[in-house]
């Protein structure tokens, strides 16, 4: 997703009363995160599970939250998602940058990137891929999910090399 | 002092302030000693009590938030000390009940006896207290409200054969009670 749209995604979600953005940086999401940093709304943690814990505490305080991470961090977090977010039904939006979507991405991303859609399916975390064209409807869908007290994930694919 | 005694003393001294308790025997002891609406009993997600407590502390600046952690739990999430120390929530009191063991899984040793957890917390900009007796615990509890957080209490406890019952609230009930108490 291009820079302008990533910034728009942040502004759009932020204007829809998502108050907290907690996570671990990912280059695929860097403009989204930068927009949040400019607005002083980002908390960066040491690991993704920690971010989920902080966002859970904030959500329990009746303050809606989004957690951002790379898909490698999502894989790290599966136990936390199942035994905290899903067990207690904590409505959190996950924003996940998908490395290894391109089959010629860096080698460390290939295996986990390949099984990313399966991982989401297996743990029954509903998700949508957002793009330059459909991001607004994807964001509206996610906002609706958490209003219904369900956690969900928005995925941004890594479509470039560096 | 065993964990349940320390848990009962602290919970009995802090009124309705929220407590986030770590998974395993910690949450069970708190449930049996002092069940209340604003207790978040963590039953999975080992290591994350400190992070959940941080999230609550940042959003509830007028309440004191207590984290009941174990040595095994905090050793799994030492990074949270860095995040807490950098955000400096004045209202966060992080208590580690240290028995140098993973008591909930059969008493296997942790490495907390070989390092100084309180020194790590101090370097992460917590105000620290090390406690080895009930008398000291009671005197520290009386004065901690005068200090600005984050505050770290390392309480040395002995292992025990006493077992508290499981938390009988369903996870979703725990969530709803806590959310209501924080409205």
Image (tube, rainbow, N blue to C red):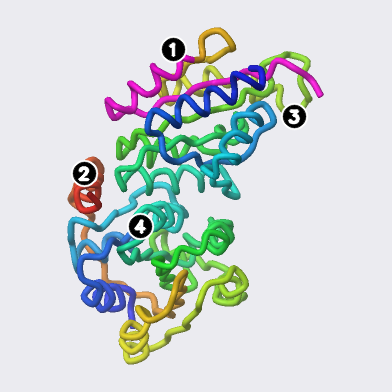
The relative height of residue B89 versus residue A139 in the rendered view (above or below) is: below
For label 1, the residue is A137
Q: Residue at x 31, y 72 (%)?
A: B161
Residue in the foreground of this view, choosing between A7 and B42: A7
**Structural distance between the alpha carbons of marks 1 and 3:** 32 Å
Q: Secondary structure at mark 3?
A: helix
**Structural distance between the alpha carbons of marks 4 and 1:** 42 Å
Q: Quadrant of residue A100?
A: top right
Q: Residues within 10 Å of mark 2 (few under 14, many from 20)?
A: some
Mark carried by residue B176: 2
Q: Secondary structure at mark 4?
A: loop
Q: Residue at x 24, y 47 (%)?
A: B179
Q: Residues within 10 Å of mark 1 (few under 14, many from 20)?
A: few
**Structural distance between the alpha carbons of marks 2 and 1:** 30 Å
**Structural distance between the alpha carbons of marks 2 and 3:** 41 Å
| Marks 2, 3: nearer the viewer | 2
What chain letter is assigned to the residue under label 3? A
Mark carried by residue A108: 3
Does label 1 or label 3 sit earlier along the sequence? 3
> Are marks 2 and 3 in one subunit?
no
Does label 2 or label 4 sit earlier along the sequence? 4
- On the image, the x and y values in percent for residue A60 come to 31, 46
What chain letter is assigned to the residue under label 4? B
Q: Is residue A66 visible?
A: yes
Q: Residue at x 37, y 85 (%)?
A: B140
- On the image, the x and y values in percent for residue B83 come to 55, 57
């Amino acid at each position: 997703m291009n820079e302008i749209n990533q910034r728009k995604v942040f502004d759009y979600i932020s204007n829809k009363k998502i108050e907290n953005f907690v996570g671990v940086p990912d280059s695929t999401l860097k403009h989204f995160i930068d927009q949040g940093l400019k607005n002083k709304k980002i908390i960066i943690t040491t690991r993704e599970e920690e971010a989920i814990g902080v966002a859970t505490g904030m959500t329990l305080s009746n303050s809606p939250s989004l957690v951002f991470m790379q898909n490698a961090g999502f894989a790290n977090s599966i136990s936390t998602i199942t035994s905290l977010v899903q067990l207690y039904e904590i409505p959190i939006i996950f924003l996940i940058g998908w490395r290894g979507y391109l089959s010629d991405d860096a080698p460390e991303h290939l295996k986990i990137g390949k099984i990313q859609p399966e991982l989401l399916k297996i743990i029954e975390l509903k998700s949508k891929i957002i793009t330059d064209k459909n991001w607004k409807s994807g964001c509206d869908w996610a906002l609706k999910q958490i209003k219904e007290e369900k956690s969900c994930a928005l995925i941004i694919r890594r479509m470039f090399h560096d | 002092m065993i964990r349940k005694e320390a848990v009962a003393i602290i919970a009995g001294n802090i009124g309705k302030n929220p407590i986030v308790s770590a998974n395993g025997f910690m949450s069970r002891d708190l449930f049996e000693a002092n069940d209340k609406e604003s207790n978040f009993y963590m039953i999975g997600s080992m290591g994350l009590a400190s992070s959940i407590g941080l999230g609550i502390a940042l959003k509830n600046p007028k309440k004191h938030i207590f984290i009941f952690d174990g040595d095994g739990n905090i050793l799994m999430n030492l990074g949270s000390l860095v995040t807490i120390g950098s955000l400096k929530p004045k209202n966060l009191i992080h208590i580690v009940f240290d028995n140098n063991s993973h008591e909930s899984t059969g008493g296997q040793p942790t490495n907390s006896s070989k390092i100084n957890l309180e020194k790590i917390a101090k370097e992460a900009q917590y105000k620290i207290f090390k406690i080895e007796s009930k008398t000291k615990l009671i005197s520290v509890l009386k004065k901690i409200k005068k200090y600005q957080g984050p505050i770290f209490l390392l309480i040395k406890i002995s292992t025990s054969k006493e077992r508290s019952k499981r938390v009988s609230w369903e996870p979703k009930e725990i969530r709803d009670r806590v959310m209501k108490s924080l409205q």
